[in-house]
Amino acid sequence: MGASLFKRLVVGRPMPLSLARHERLSKKTALAVFASDALSSTAYATEEILRVLVLAGAGAVSLAIPVALAIAGLLIVVATSYQQTIHAYPQGGGSYIVARSNLGATPGLVAAASLMIDYVLTVAVSVAAGVAAITSAFPSLFGHRVAIGVFCVAVTAFSNLRGLRESGRLFAVPTYLFIATFGTLVGVGLFRLFNGDVWPLPSAPVEPATTLTGFLVLRAFASGCTALTGMEAISDGVPAFKEPEYRNAAITLRWMAGILATLFLGITVLAAALRIMPVEHETVVSQLARGLFGQGTFYYLIQAATALILILAANTSFADFPRLAFFLARDHYAPRQFGKRGDRLVFSNGIIILAALAALLLILFHGDTHALIPLYAVGVFVSFTLSQAGMVRRWQVERTSGWRWRLAVNGIGAGLTAVVALVIAITKFTRGAWIVVVLIPILVLVFHAVARHYALVADQLSLEGYGGPSPIRHTVLVPIGDVHVGVVNAVQYAKLLSPEAKAVYVETDPQQTRRLEEKWTKWGMGVPLVILTSPYRSLLTPLLEYIDHLQEQKGEFRRVITIVVPEFIPAHWWQHLLHNQTALLIKGALLFRKDVIVTDVPYHLTH
Amino acid sequence: MGASLFKRLVVGRPMPLSLARHERLSKKTALAVFASDALSSTAYATEEILRVLVLAGAGAVSLAIPVALAIAGLLIVVATSYQQTIHAYPQGGGSYIVARSNLGATPGLVAAASLMIDYVLTVAVSVAAGVAAITSAFPSLFGHRVAIGVFCVAVTAFSNLRGLRESGRLFAVPTYLFIATFGTLVGVGLFRLFNGDVWPLPSAPVEPATTLTGFLVLRAFASGCTALTGMEAISDGVPAFKEPEYRNAAITLRWMAGILATLFLGITVLAAALRIMPVEHETVVSQLARGLFGQGTFYYLIQAATALILILAANTSFADFPRLAFFLARDHYAPRQFGKRGDRLVFSNGIIILAALAALLLILFHGDTHALIPLYAVGVFVSFTLSQAGMVRRWQVERTSGWRWRLAVNGIGAGLTAVVALVIAITKFTRGAWIVVVLIPILVLVFHAVARHYALVADQLSLEGYGGPSPIRHTVLVPIGDVHVGVVNAVQYAKLLSPEAKAVYVETDPQQTRRLEEKWTKWGMGVPLVILTSPYRSLLTPLLEYIDHLQEQKGEFRRVITIVVPEFIPAHWWQHLLHNQTALLIKGALLFRKDVIVTDVPYHLTH
């Protein structure tokens, strides 16, 4: 079939189950796949800190360094805490699973809701920031950023529909290019800084819009915490690693945290040293690279690497969102179809929905990273908190060797991230965080409603104590408008279904009826013809009344009526417009009627 | 049902056939219904002449009077010619019918295509001009003219869906208000002109954009010929008149032509006397009324009457477009559904399509009358020509008394309108007339393709020489994923259809299969269970292969396979998202397969 061929071309050949094991990732590939989100946030986290601090004037910008140090400290605490999760959940310990198994269903669902929102935002923010890297280098594209962003989302979704292994290969190059170029930028920059070879860039004077308060510093800290987004990706994807999974995953996590902290701090220190002020049309990283290296080949390489890793960072969500949806569907909290693996063992439904929501966000927020940031990170820190609180509870219950210090590690992580979640929610509440604060409980209610519905359905469908179906009295009707080969075939089929089949004709002109009856005598195959009159020329009303009339005849039997509708299947698509209007009408009118079953009998036209 | 109740509220109660006769129109009402299009064109025809002439400078504007006189002469010729058509075709002689019955199928279809295009343009142009009358009086609405226009189209379509008699009543007031106010405007204006009481209005100096050429005068003439649009409406609608139909129709036609010629000439003479120059934001009629009467009550009354008759003039098309579609459907040139009268004896399908196309044109041409005009009138004059050429041929063949001078009348009409059609097509070709020139042959080809298709279908369906259907071997399959009450009901139904029914299960996990088989022993009602293995986890592929396998078993029987699919009907709409994904998949895959019939067996969930 055409549609099937199309699917083959787009998503590739189907893959037998036995191949699933070979999809496992090496540490190097896993770092590329799972760390791109976390690492790429260095492209905008420093800028978000500066954007807040600069409100208090150019002098306040130097506060970026202590703020960044606090965030780097937080990063190390969270990474240490997650390492324990990886160890305890080698089968994959996302926040949902850890919170649910240790704290109960609702905390688990709060974590799930937070993560779902965050996965969507990761795609939207990463792509927006990636496009900002492109438009910094080529300002003439600035007006097209929404279109470019939506295109990038589509390309990412497409590559994910083609399967995980290709994704790994696809993402290795940009991730390592990013690490190499940003490493060079930070390394050379710091070397020159220590040798006194760095001077502040000239910039337009900044008018302070407000005074420097503790609240403003907290807001800057909250904005910078976006650097931690993506940290949980590895703990969620442990089973995708090569054996021994948990060890490889833990090592990868440490590398990721180390690289992330280094690049983030390095960029912040350099931005402060060069006195870079955030502006609308150029990113801070672009200004930094231009200031240190000039607008040459290396500058464009940095911008390209930034754009690539950011746009591809969205991939972390494309791996995690469908996986989370799968876990939720397995536990009956999400529609069952999310629980089905696509032909290529990826979860196509989740990928498509994620791409659609992210594209919508890009359009609604005009592809502006800065406008999306306040929504970001609330969800991340809520899920961090719940995940680590779950681990705390686990050590309390299990009391395995060394449980006390393990509990302390996770306890500190849980406490700190809870405080940070509150700080983010409060300082960014009016700027968009409220949307997430409102959305999380709504999603939790939806999850519960879905689960309740499936439970009720299972209850209705249960054979426990079911006495079996009541006996049926079956009537088959064939509504006809004329007698021709298509009708004769439909009547033959109807006769096969029940010896009690009847043809039904709605009369609008008695003369036509007489001609029809003559034809029927010859071609009716002994099936009785019921003539219904129609004073209003309506074809439908008399038929519906006749069905009502049949169903009223009660007995100890259930009366089931099958309506056999002859339908033409034309040879060309446009010919559909010329046929089957009546069939459609009948189907529409009887769609949800109890004990009425409508069956199309196709008659294939050859030309 | 909800949808049915909605339809009742919108289009009113259904009406039995016997009421049809009482829908007939008196001459006064008929003038309002059929003449609104023709009369209303006086609101923009003069302006369109001026817009062309002014290109050659302010001095060229005085040429409007001879141009208008030529158009008025043409109008009298066409009206005289059409009077003979009304007499010869008392059952309704639209161009399509006259051309088809005298000249053959293709000329008839060319006339039909021309008219169809023109009906759509009548709605779009009239509404655009009506909105221009409103925005002339209230310039702040100018920015909203597309939205206002689309709204007017919707209202007109709605009133037509409610039936013809209400239309007559609805349209009498604005038509007679228009005749009265425009009559007063022209009468008072001419009286003052003859008494020397009229002075030119002050206006911005006009830079000539081109020199005055014969071609420019022809273009002005072509633009003014829009005054004749709508002339054919009466001849098409003769059967809607009270008896004696043809006499009443002819009298109405004469009145219409007389009023039209008077108002059109009067406005043109006054516009020339006041030296009115066309401007973008105000119509010529608005300038004229303001110049003669000042911006008082009468001015607003004129604008209101203009807007009303123009917006309601679209009604002529709403009566004629569905009627033409009905004739075409009757002759198999248009989809059959156009041949069905709606519940209230109007042709709902045509009304809805016409409204949609006109709204589309308004959006595409930004609601600008002047931009739409070049597309207009080509179709009208092509259909005038064909209709009158048909009459010429008729007199040649029939040779009834006085046929010679009758032939001469129609011959002059045909010749003149043919020349005018050419003039319009050539002078406005690059400005939009080419669209219509291209569209007419395309539509004719579509009409022929539709007719050919229906002929081929009738041939395939003909029982002439048909030996009867070949005997069927019937197999019923129920694909199941589990055993529950819904499945048990579906299997009970399948057993009813055929003693050879089988349940089919696609195995993805052998352990589940064992549990299922146990349940089946208890609940399978003796129906055999076929287990298909699936190495690729696909549910569909094994099922399709099994069906292929069954269909391969050839014999002297036709093998028909009925697939019974259990489907849930949830209690709430949102729950549809949670069910039936598999049923949809199966239906999609088997939709167009030969000798496979898919039947949903609904299972109604109660909560």
Image (cartoon, coloured by chain):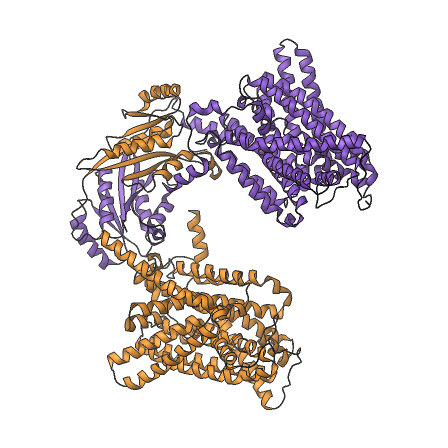
Chain colours: A purple, B orange
Q: Please indicate whether residue A231 sits to the left or right of residue A486 in the image.
A: right
Question: Which residue occupies 67% across, 77% down?
Answer: B204
Q: Is residue A556 visible?
A: no
Q: Please indicate whether residue A179 sits to the left or right of residue B341 in the image.
A: right
Rendering coords of residue B577 (x, y %): 47, 36
Question: Which residue occupies 55% across, 63% down?
Answer: B366
Q: Residue furthest bottom?
A: B195
Q: Please indicate whether residue A46 sits to the left or right of residue A107 in the image.
A: right
Residue A228 versus residue B271 in the image, above or below: above
Q: Nearer the viewer, residue B320 or B421?
A: B421
Rendering coords of residue B512 (x, y %): 39, 21
Q: Nearer the viewer, residue A182 or A2?
A: A182
Q: Nearer the viewer, residue A174 or A224?
A: A174
Q: Is residue B330 visible?
A: yes
Q: Nearer the viewer, residue A549 or B293?
A: B293
Rendering coords of residue B570 (x, y %): 44, 36
Residue B501 versus residue B280 in the image, above or below: above
Q: How many labels were placed on the picture?
A: 0
Rendering coords of residue B159 (x, y %): 46, 62
The picture quadrant where one finds residue B288 is bottom right
Residue A51 versus residue A536 in the image, above or below: above
